[in-house]
């Protein structure tokens, strides 16, 4: 079972636990992309897909007794950000051009809670 570990603010953690927040969004940047996506060769072109994740372990804070929750992941997808004309939005970082994208995780049931 593959678990992704993420920090989260208390308000958002509370919303997940109450069932109000059913999706988690994370921006994909060059410095964190290996955490969220994997590259593969599709018909001669390099492409990306979400890394397989079965659950997310959310931590709130950095203390030893911090709140911690493990939530099942029902689905994960890459969402590319487009402008009002439907064109991909790009940005430059360290001289390279990238598409603006985020991970969208559909959250399922609570697997475990600690220090809540």
Image (cartoon, rainbow, N blue to C red):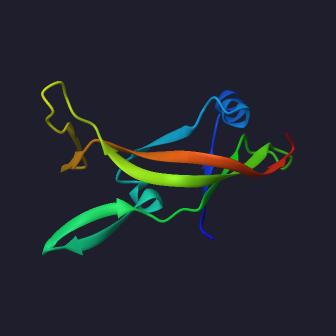
Nearest to the observer: residue 47 or residue 20: 20
Number of residue marks: 0
Residue 50 x %, y %: 40, 60
Which residue is painted at 27% across and 37% down in the image? 81
Q: Position of residue 20 (x, y in %)?
A: 63, 29
Residue at the spot x=47%, y=43% of the render?
Answer: 26
Image quarter for residue 12? Answer: top right
In the rendered view, does 97 fall on the left or right side of 6? left
Q: Position of residue 69 (x, y in %)?
A: 74, 48
User: Which residue corresponds to the image point at 60% horizontal and 32% vertical from the top-left?
Assistant: 21
Q: Nearer the viewer, residue 71 or 109?
A: 109
Q: Is residue 35 above or below residue 6?
A: below
* Residue at 34 percent of width and 53 percent of height: 30
Residue that extends furthest to the top in the rendered view of this protein: 84
Give the position of the C terminus as an image quadrant. Answer: top right
The quadrant in which the N terminus is found is: bottom right
């Amino acid at each position: 079972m593959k678990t992704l570990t993420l920090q989260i603010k208390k308000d958002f953690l509370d919303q997940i636990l109450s069932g109000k927040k059913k999706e988690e969004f994370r921006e994909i940047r060059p410095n964190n992309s290996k955490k969220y996506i994997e590259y593969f060769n599709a018909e001669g072109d390099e492409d990306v897909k979400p890394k397989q994740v079965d659950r997310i372990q959310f931590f709130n804070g950095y203390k030893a007794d911090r709140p911690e929750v493990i939530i099942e992941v029902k689905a994960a997808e890459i969402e590319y950000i487009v402008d009002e004309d439907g064109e991909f939005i790009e940005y430059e970082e360290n001289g390279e051009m990238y598409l603006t994208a985020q991970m969208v995780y559909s959250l399922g049931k609570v697997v475990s809670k600690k220090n809540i």
